[in-house]
Image (cartoon, rainbow, N blue to C red):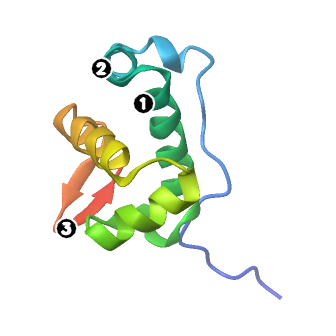
């Protein structure tokens, strides 16, 4: 029997020096270690969900907030900054990497 087709990833590469990428350093400078943690968890989150995208909506940010244990405001600020840096993209109301 063939494996079922998945629309998500089991893993992603995480470079040992990701923290030193200029855009990631910018996140760390603006939001501190909390921003880096949110960025890392967002990549994990995106990797594990169907289609590797989530809706850019108030309710989705609230659900992510509950998952990460971080305020909605902090998550949305990091997401918006990552979109500005072109690390994430808001395409038709869905956030993708």
Task: First in sequence, mark 1 or 2: give its number.
Answer: 2
**Of discs 3 and 2, which sits in the foreground?**
2
Check disc 2 and report the residue beneath it: 30
The answer to whether marks 1 and 3 mark residues whose Cβ atoms lie closer than 8 Å is no
Q: Residue furthest bottom?
A: 1
**Which numbered tag is attached to residue 58?**
none
**Which numbered tag is attached to residue 93?**
3
At x 48%, y 47%, the residue is 70
Left or right position of 87 against 18? left
Check disc 1 and report the residue beneath it: 35
Query: How far apart are the alpha carbons under marks 3 and 2?
Result: 25 Å
Badge 2 element = helix
Left or right position of 32 against 29? right
Query: How far apart are the alpha carbons under marks 1 and 3?
Result: 22 Å
- Residue 69, compared with residue 16, is above or below; it is below
Q: How many labels, in total?
A: 3
Q: Position of residue 15 (x, y in %)?
A: 59, 23
- Residue 41, compared with residue 59, is above or below; it is above
- Residue 96, compared with residue 23, is above or below; it is below
The answer to whether marks 1 and 2 mark residues whose Cβ atoms lie closer than 8 Å is yes
Quadrant location of residue 90?
bottom left
- Residue 1, compared with residue 34, is above or below; it is below
At x 45%, y 37%, the residue is 39
At x 22%, y 43%, the residue is 80
Q: Residue furthest right?
A: 1
Badge 1 element = helix
Q: Position of residue 43 (x, y in %)?
A: 49, 45
Q: Quadrant of the N terminus?
A: bottom right
Badge 3 element = loop
At x 41%, y 15%, the residue is 21
């Amino acid at each position: 029997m063939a494996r079922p087709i998945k629309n998500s990833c089991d893993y992603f590469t995480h470079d040992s020096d990701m923290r030193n990428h200029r855009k990631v350093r910018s996140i760390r400078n603006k939001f501190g270690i909390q921003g880096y943690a949110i960025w890392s968890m967002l990549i994990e989150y995106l990797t594990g969900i169907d289609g590797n995208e989530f809706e850019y909506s108030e309710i989705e940010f609230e659900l992510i907030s509950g998952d990460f244990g971080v305020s909605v405001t902090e998550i949305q600020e990091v997401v918006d900054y990552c979109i500005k840096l072109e690390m994430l993209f808001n395409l038709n109301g869905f956030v993708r990497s």
